[in-house]
Amino acid sequence: MTADFSPDGQFLATAGVDTTVKLWRPDGTLFKTLRGHQGNVRNVQFSPDGQWLASAGDAGKVQLWTVTGERVRTFRTDFQGIWGLAFSADSQTLVVGGPSHPLEIWHIDGRRITLVD
């Protein structure tokens, strides 16, 4: 199970072994179920500016969603599974890490910027 609060506190994102990401309201009511992953979802992360939600897991793909749960794009990484995910402070870049590979750095427009060993 993984979880993250949106910066404004309006949503809680959770995910796990059922291949979905769930967005919850602060009172505990389900707002939306996000589908699109194949396999366990290991990471959910809201961007610092509160505009984006990224999710990633065992299939090696990162899904980028709007904060209200509309899928924007999919990043196809070189990883078999993704174990780490983080936004830059300006919310324009994602760093993605697998179990034993270098890190991949992506722009949110879908361009892979570089690999970091």
Image (cartoon, grey):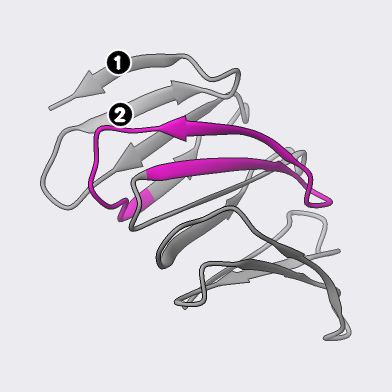
Which disc is residue 35 wearing?
A: none
Q: Is residue 57 above or below residue 14?
A: above
Instruction: Specify the farthest residue to the bottom.
Output: 28
Give the secondary structure at mark 1: strand
Q: Is residue 17 above or below residue 105?
A: below
Q: Is residue 90 above or below residue 15?
A: above
Q: Is residue 2 above or below residue 51?
A: below
Membership of 74 in magenta stretch: yes
Q: Earlier in the sequence, mark 2 or mark 1?
A: 2
Asked whether the beta carbons under mark 2 and mark 1 sit within 8 Å of each other, the answer is: yes
Q: Indicate left or right for 29 with 39 as reference.
A: right
Q: Indicate left or right for 54 with 70 as reference.
A: left
Image quadrant holding the C terminus, namely top left
Label 2 crowding class (10 Å Cα cut-off): few <14, some 14-19, many 20+? many
Give the secondary structure at mark 2: strand
Q: Disc 2 designates what residue?
A: 104
Q: Give residue 27's quadrant in the image.
A: bottom right
Q: Disc 1 designates what residue?
A: 114
- Rendered residue at 69%/43% (across/down): 65
Three-letter residue code for mark 1: Thr
* Real-space Cα separation, disc 2 to disc 1, in angstroms: 6 Å
- Rendered residue at 86%/64% (across/down): 10
Specify start and end residues of the magenta stretch as a single range.
61-84
Q: Where does residue 75 sit, x and y in percent of width and height?
A: 47, 31
- Rendered residue at 87%/83% (across/down): 29
Q: Where does residue 78 sit, x and y in percent of width and height?
A: 25, 33
